[in-house]
Amino acid sequence: MVCAICTIATGCAGGSDRYPSLAVRDAERIQGTFEPVDSSDAVTKPRPAPPGQQSQLNALLSEAGAVHADFMESVPAAQDLILAIDETGPENKAWGDAQVALAALESRRSQAAIALGDMDLLYANASADFVERREIDAARQQVIALIEQEDAILAELRRQISQ
């Protein structure tokens, strides 16, 4: 029986001259060479910033600086109000006054964050338009430093008021 199956299976295979060869044909051979591209030509430089961008950045920096100066001027009064709180807690008028002063400081911090948000929008638009962004980034870093300073002061005041 095994011999019969072997005979039938070999009968299906015909001569190799009826099937195409699997050898690589001349058309399939790789020809030619590729020259490497000069990397200095491949780097595209962003366009220069539009003319009004610097004045817009200066206005936003000025706004953030004015809000920060106002914030810093208000800090001592808020600290004095927080120090005036005694152990009676929220029912004390001094506690409410300190909360109002803290809220006013947080509002000023938010105004600085609005200027930062406008700078972020300028940065995003410059990125999308492939425009130079170094000036925008430098201005953003200045405002971020101001906001970080304000955040640290607010955190300390919140810690003092919760004691």
Image (tube, rainbow, N blue to C red):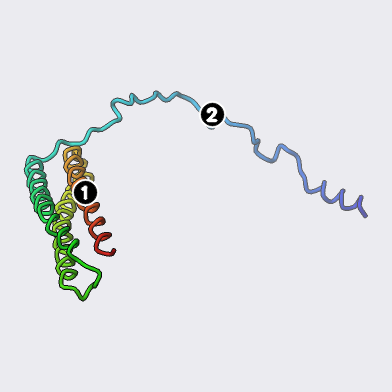
Q: Secondary structure at mark 1?
A: helix
Task: Say which quadrant the N terminus sits in.
Answer: bottom right
In the rendered structure, the answer to whether residue 28 lies left or right of residue 108 reads right
Residue 18 in which image quadrant: top right
Q: Residues within 10 Å of mark 2 (few under 14, many from 20)?
A: few
- Depth check, front residue: 81 or 50: 81
Q: Position of residue 161 (x, y in %)?
A: 24, 63
- Depth check, front residue: 74 or 33: 74
In the rendered structure, the answer to whether residue 6 lies left or right of residue 136 reads right
> Is residue 98 positioned above or below 67 on the image?
below
**Real-space CA distance between mark 1 and mark 2, rounded to the nearest whole angstrom:** 67 Å
- Judge depth for marks 1 and 2 and give the one in front: 1
Among all residues in the image, which is located at the extreme bottom? 91
> Image point 23% across, 44% down: which residue?
127
Residue 83 in which image quadrant: bottom left
> Is residue 162 positioned above or below 51 on the image?
below
Which amino acid type is shown beneath numbered disc 1?
Answer: Gln
Q: Position of residue 43 (x, y in %)?
A: 28, 31
Pointers 1 and 2 in contact (C-beta within 8 Å): no
Q: Residues within 10 Å of mark 1 (few under 14, many from 20)?
A: some
Which amino acid type is shown beneath numbered disc 2?
Answer: Arg
Which mark sits nearer the N-terminus, 1 or 2? 2
- Depth check, front residue: 161 or 121: 161
Q: Secondary structure at mark 2?
A: loop
- Residue at which label 2 appears: 29
Q: Position of residue 31 (x, y in %)?
A: 49, 25
Residue 114 in which image quadrant: bottom left
Residue 149 marker:
1
